């Protein structure tokens, strides 16, 4: 295994970091808002799915009990 040159490593790290494209503040805020909207819609969806399953099970168990 070849020994690593620390100076060359740091130069490569700086070259890779220079390639990073950071999102704008608008993009970050828009993406964050989209995540909150989707999380809310998912929570509402699963609330209604749970409500339907619970109602169905309650009625089925009420017929036998």
Image (cartoon, rainbow, N blue to C red):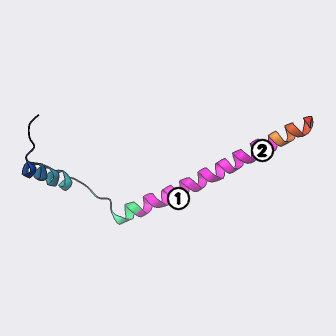
Dividing the picture into quadrants, the one containing residue 58 is top right
Residue 28 against residue 42 in the figure, above or below:
below
Q: Nearer the viewer, mark 2 or mark 1?
A: 2
Q: Which residue, given by chain and number where applicable, does mark 2 sit on?
A: 54
Q: Which residues are magenta?
A: 29-56
Residue at left offset 70%, top offset 45%: 49
Residue at left offset 16%, top offset 51%: 13
Looking at the rendering, in which quadrant would you find the N terminus? top left
Nearer the observer, 2 or 10: 2
Q: Is residue 54 magenta?
A: yes
Q: Which residue, given by chain and number where applicable, does mark 1 sit on?
A: 36
Residue at left offset 81%, top offset 44%: 55
Residue at left offset 8%, top offset 40%: 3
Extreme-bottom residue of the structure: 25
Residue 61 against residue 39 in the figure, above or below:
above
Q: Horizontal and vertical percent for residue 57? A: 81, 39
Direction from residue 48 to residue 13 in the image, left or right: left
């Amino acid at each position: 295994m070849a020994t690593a040159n620390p100076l060359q490593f740091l130069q490569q790290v700086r070259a890779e970091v220079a390639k990073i494209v950071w999102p704008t503040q608008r993009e970050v805020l828009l993406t964050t808002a989209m995540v909150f909207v989707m999380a809310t819609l998912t929570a509402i969806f699963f609330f209604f799915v749970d409500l339907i399953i619970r109602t169905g099970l309650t009625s089925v168990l009420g017929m036998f009990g």
